[in-house]
Image (cartoon, helix red, strand yellow):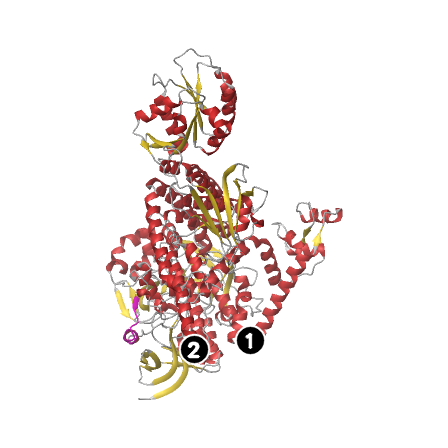
Amino acid sequence: MFAEDTISTIATAPGEGAIGIIRMSGSLTIKIAETFFRGINGKSARHIASQQVAYGHIIDPDNGLVIDEVLLLVMHGPKSYTREDVVEIHCHGGPVPMKKILALTLQYGARLSEPGEFTKRAFLNGRLDLSQAEAVMDIIRAKTDASLRMAVGHLSGALSDEIRKMRYEILRMIANLEATIDFPEEDIEVLAAQDVRAAVELLLADVNHLLLTKETGRILREGLETVILGKPNVGKSSLLNALLKEKRAIVTDIPGTTRDVIEEFVNLSGVPLKIVDTAGIRETSDIIEQMGVEKAKEFVVTADLILLLLDASLPLSAEDREVLAMLSGKQAIVLVNKTDLPVLLNLDEVYTYIADTKVLKISVMEGTGLPELEQMIVDMVYGGEIAQKEGAFLTNLRQANLLEQAKYHLEATIATIDEGMPSDCIVIDLKESWDKLGEITGDTVGEDIIDQIFTQFCIGK
Amino acid sequence: MFIAGEYDVIVIGSGHSGCEAALAAARMGCQTLLTTINLDNIAFMPCNPSVGGPAKGHLVRELDALGGQMGINADKTSLQMRMLNTGKGPAVHALRAQADKDLYHITMKETVENQPNLDVKQVLVERILSKDQKVYGIEVETGEIYYTKSIILATGTYLGGKIIIGELAYKGGPNGQRAAENLTSSLKELNIRIMRFKTGTPARVDKRSLDFSKMIEQPGDEEVHNFSFLSEITTRMQLPCWLTYTNEKTHEIIRNNLHRAPMYTGIVEGVGPRYCPSIESKIVRFADKNAHQLFIEPEGHHTNEMYVQGMSTSLPIDVQYEFLRTIAGMENVKIMRPGYAIDYDCIDSTQLKPTLEFKTVQGLFSAGQINGTSGYEEAAAQGLVAGINAALLVKGQEPLILSRSDGYIGVLIDDLVTKGTNEPYRIMTSRAEFRLILRQDNADLRLTEIGRKIGLVSDERYAKFVCKRDSIEESLKLLRSVMITPTPEIQAKMQAMGTVELRTGIMLYDLLRRTEINYNMISEHFAVPLLDSAVQQQVEISAKYEGYISKQLEQVERAARLDEKLLPEDIDYMQLSGLAVEAREKLNEIRPLSVGQAGRISGVSPADISILMIYMEQKRRRDEAIDLS
């Protein structure tokens, strides 16, 4: 609504395309791009001339990891669609890099754009002519309706229950603090700052739990990106076939790719597994050597789940060790296959690489261990503790973004309490967090607080 | 037809709203008539004998900064004052005075009677005279007509008033007064929508019949406070209030007699306020509470009447006696006036512009309880704004609209005209989204300049304001320019002040931000001048709450940008097909002045606002094109 704040969105149609575009507009645009774009010649976003394209990488400033290789297009206002500073990031079309890059723009100061907001800015800043006004209004209306439908559709009952529960907790605290401010002489039991603090700590724990599920929702919608690694003849192809044979597989044909099939879907107890590079797996030749450790590394970075097959009947090879070394900190399962044969593999050595990774002994040939594998994957997706939340999970970035903001305000509330500030200051961030949570479920009504005061407390002359 | 006079502004009703309205208009140079059903009832307090409290006290200070009267007169006639909420942040500190009712009435009567340009008359207004939805006069009960350019309705609870005590119900206003019976139909002829609200008040009891040894004394603050930035009162004779409680016995009696309560027998028609429930509804709604507190408040220096705050009721008198006598210290109570409920006509406030003029009746303004509010302070604040805007209209000048970030007055009026109210509306600090900057201590800094421009701020008030404002600025400048460094000498001073030593050089201003440091300590150790206490307070608040205040100022700025985007009066919202249906209807009804106001209407979404902005840009370009051709 305010022309000067910076907005960001995925500009290309949802789904897989060869190229995806993240677009930002507003005064902070170039500053934000600077934080995570590294040009190939060390060029930063600030040094790219208007209307120029630069090649480089998007790097997560938190851990220095490369998210994707991209083309960055910079347009200085007013020579842009919105007449503001605009940056477009052209990345690989997969949903994972696009969402990660969008998340970075939000993390560094942009906000998710409202439906049709780029077009609205373009019109308000004189970029579109009068004849297009009606069309702009139609776009805003249509996109709003569509996104509302989507928001409602995506909002699981468990999530909205969870959010409403948190909001009610916060509302009760706000009502108490406000009641004691507006009616200081009524005999209302004063909620001590330390009690607010304790309650906010609990809420923060809930928020953090819920934030852990931000991947769950995506996985359930888009599939758990899974890569099967292992040296030749270890049984990758058999494992894939075993998974596909048992389950109803959906094979996707993606036009414009050089291989006919690059990924296949398997449904494991409701968790869709998207197994990538299946064409590669099916080739009988030596995969690791062919695609090289570099390629494996790339998969390890982007995949949600890595299944590494080791041959129980052989000692660890150099390639095995190299791949094992990449697994630390990743969601991975090491499958020790061919356990029906005499065991030569030194399992203790395997554990030295992957202390906290799950290891499962299977035999694809005999079909043993596969149900356990399935259960293990399902448990990983619902994240153990997360599963106890009766399936409340975030389903899109907008929700995660709002929840992050709510978290920020809850943390600010604690900081305010710790600084010894009075109740009217404490309530400021509490209210903000309540508003942000309300935006997730679509209930933000100001009168609620006053209604709650009169419901909760007997006040009167 | 007898034409008895001709005025610029006529005010109907001389309660807290009417008095402020008439004084403002007259002081702005308009020939003004203030009418009342009874001259002995001017600025009467029919409910509790107090002024101020959270948000209400803020209103009084804002009113004062704009040149209103309530603060000055409350200071003169107070019999006790307390600063409430001192344990909380400065934004919610709130001054509350117990007022001497008779003295307040007589002081305001004297003020209005002696105001140049202002006539005060005892007449009962029966009809608004208008032509083509534009007012030109009033007709009173005795038949005479007064011509006028504008009218301010400030009828309080007198419009179609009905008093209810138990099984007894009769037409009338508070305090044995007559009600205005015929004016409502005149308003209906102007197509004004009327609603019906209810309020109530407790019994007044004889001081001599109470045993204060069984109650807890509630004295005023030792420190002498004033509402008005002009008042220089330094000593005040104070009377205590007394605290006592209801008990299970009280509640049992009330429960046993609920079938005789007018709210259950159906005699009461109006909607009552939730924040001021009768004792009978408290006991029904909060059944598990076994005691409710009661404040026994003196009504004046020259009366034995005591107000039983917390005990508002319309139960029959025998029940009132029975339950009052269960209360500690009231065993032998003698009632002087019984508690009662009052039903009255009020208007749907969304029919008003933010100037408090009716959207559809030119020259007709409405202020106070008739707009659905309750409280003397809310009434006075609206009266002032209506008086100012009636005068500005007569003079052909731009109206005064206070925004939500200008003050509680802005919040109050914006809530009324944008959202409306379905129960008597009370101002609360929690209604103000910019609470941190709308403090009672800075009301003068926020509003004196505005009052000066209108012509309501005297030279004396203005000089005082300028001096305070400049001293604050100078002091802040000084504190921000003096740096202290971690030398042994300075570290010794840090120790002496009981604060942690410096690690790097900092400005004195940053030192003041530390919780344990106050301005006097800095003045003592670093030879900066001592300040007037009001100036010092502003400097300290500025330093200690800077982070919160600057965040809020950013929000204010954003809101202001939307409030500055004005919407043309003639938009046909029903034709704007891009808008959601609910938004179309709401916008058409409220007809907001700005995009900001539109966004505050419930049922209008951000997408609707976007569409509205596109529409306006479209219209602007079209108009531009027409101008060029």
Q: Magenta stretch?
A: B186-195
Q: Secondary structure at mark 1?
A: loop
Q: Which mark is residue B393?
A: 2
**C-beta proximity under 8 Å, tags 1 and 2:** no
In this rendering, the answer to whether A219 lies above or below A130 is above
Residue B582 visible in the picture:
yes
**Do the residues at discs 1 and 2 belong to one chain?**
yes
On what subunit does the disc labeled 2 rest?
A: B
* Residue B622 position within the rendered picture, expressed as x and y whole percent measured from the top left: 40, 69
Image height of B625 relative to B214, above or below? below
Please state, as top left, top right, bottom left or bottom right, where the C terminus of chain B lies in the image.
bottom left
**x and y percentages locating residue A264 in the rendered image:** 35, 31
Q: Which mark is residue B458?
A: 1
Provide the secondary structure element on which disc 2 rests.
helix
Instruction: From the viewer's side, name the closer residue of A455 and A27.
Output: A27
Please rate how many residues cluster around mark 1, counting C-alpha atoms within 10 Å: few if below 14, some from 14 to 19, many from 20. Answer: some
Task: Tell me which corner region of the image, top left, top right, bottom left or bottom right, holds residue A63.
Answer: top right
